[in-house]
Image: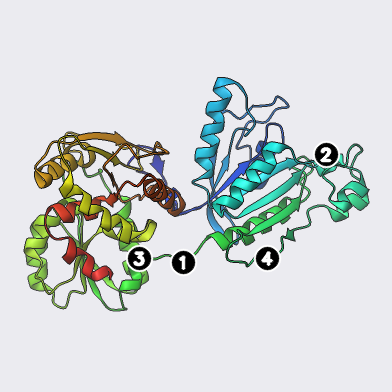
Amino acid sequence: MVRRKDGSNMGLNETPSGERVRIGFFGVRNAGKSSLVNAVCGQQVALVSDVAGTTTDPVRKAMELLPLGPVDIVDTPGIDDVGELGARRVERTRETLRTCDVAVLVTDATRALVAAEHELISLLEELGLPFIVVRNKVDLLSGEGVAAGSGGATGGAASGAADASIAQVVAAPDVDAPVAPARAEVLASARTGAGINELKEALAHVGGSAAHERRVVADLLSPGDKVVLVVPIDSSAPKGRIILPQQLVLRDVLDAHASAMVCQPGELADLLAAVHSIRLVITDSQAFQRVASIVPETTPLTSFSLLMARYKGDLRTLVEGAAALGALTDESRVLISEGCTHHRQCEDIGTVKMPAWIRGYCGANPTFEFTQGHGFPDDVSGYDVVVHCGGCMLNEREMHWRQSVAAKSGTPMVNYGAAIACVHGILERSLRPLM
């Protein structure tokens, strides 16, 4: 086992959570969300009872869902929870929604859709999020009710005729329309297992529409290219491994059938003298200034963080946000946000190094505030700039959501790599290989 930045264990062959298709199960209390999650996963992932509101926090399960591949399944509290604590649970559910690539709305087939379910469908359509409506508990319907797909049918045990019609996957009209998200409807029973295989097939179909081929660096390379990765090993480096962006880049270089050479900054000059025709040098952003002084101007140079910005978010707007750094004053407020929850150290990049670099660049002493993990605010209009990490622990949808929050708030947002390159005067150079 190895350790993630947040301290939890990660298997050597485990796909990082940010690289998995995230599938969230949503609905009102007692619709059978947890039972359906357990049925899809084939094991007891979530607690199940007849008491409404049993699920009090999002529950996650990493698994392989063929033919879709690695996924994160998320069970959530009911969207109709009540009371002060219930309102906080609903907010947690909404936070989960914005990180999902696919949503599953679990409804009770023995009744018509309720207002909260209609509202959720409208929200999913507004977000452009692919989703599946599951009419659960069809084993409680009459055969005629199931065959008709009637949400209002009531009573009776499922008959043989009903079983034959359970779990039809019905594609909504205009599935391929560019404006409407992919959508499907499935009839299923978590109790009997009817329709679970069809639900998995629907998830693969709808999830496939959400997934797309993204490359960290391979699209910039050709087979046989030589790439140098500069990886500082200091007190902040994790023991026994390299961090996730470096892992992702290294794997993508190999997938491109290029050659990767890894060294620390102190060995870089000797490596460059020994190896010719280097296609690209990629460095940890914290070593940008030192590495830039060693690498010849004729050799393309960029950073892991800028590659992550290109991979997970909108690189152009994250680079444009760097212009705000030079305009900061003593009255300015800066939000520094990281997607992971690693332990802060004395030379922490987010809370120590980044503020120092920014102060030195703008010649002022703005106020700095910090967030970690999924705790990103819904409104950042009170800040003059948001400085964000590479987002390696976030999926693409959450990174784009954070950028959209900044855009709606009218607040510039800059990526760590772009910010560090900017304050050291090498931003234009570091962007050349990415253009």
Q: CA distance from mark 3 to mark 4?
A: 35 Å
Q: CA distance from mark 3 to mark 1?
A: 12 Å
Nearer-N-terminus badge (3/4): 4
Instruction: Answer yes or no: is residue 1 visible.
Output: no
Disc 4 secondary structure class: loop
Other-residue count near label 4 (Cα within 10 Å), few / some / many at <14 / 14–19 / ≥20: few
Residue under label 2: 110
Nearer-N-terminus badge (1/4): 4
* Tags 2 and 1 touching, CB below 8 Å: no
Question: Which kind of residue does numbered mark 1 sit on?
Answer: Glu
Instruction: Answer yes or no: is residue 277 visible.
Output: yes
Other-residue count near label 1 (Cα within 10 Å), few / some / many at <14 / 14–19 / ≥20: few
Residue 174 badge: 4
Question: Which kind of residue does numbered mark 3 sit on?
Answer: Asp
Residue under label 1: 213
Disc 3 secondary structure class: helix
The residue positioned 60% from the left and 37% from the top of the image is 45
Q: In terms of image quadrants, where is residue 27? A: top right
* Tags 1 and 4 touching, CB below 8 Å: no
Q: Measured along the vertical axis of the image, is residue 65 above or below residue 221?
A: above
Residue 4 badge: none
Q: CA distance from mark 1 to mark 4?
A: 23 Å
| Quarter in which the N terminus is drawn | top left
Q: CA distance from mark 2 to mark 1?
A: 40 Å
Pinpoint residue 75: horizontal percent, then vertical percent.
59, 39
Pinpoint residue 359: horizontal percent, then vertical percent.
12, 41
- Choose mark 3 or mark 1, whichever is in front: 1
Other-residue count near label 2 (Cα within 10 Å), few / some / many at <14 / 14–19 / ≥20: many
Residue under label 3: 252
Q: Nearer the viewer, residue 198 or 169?
A: 169
Pinpoint residue 157: horizontal percent, then vertical percent.
90, 39
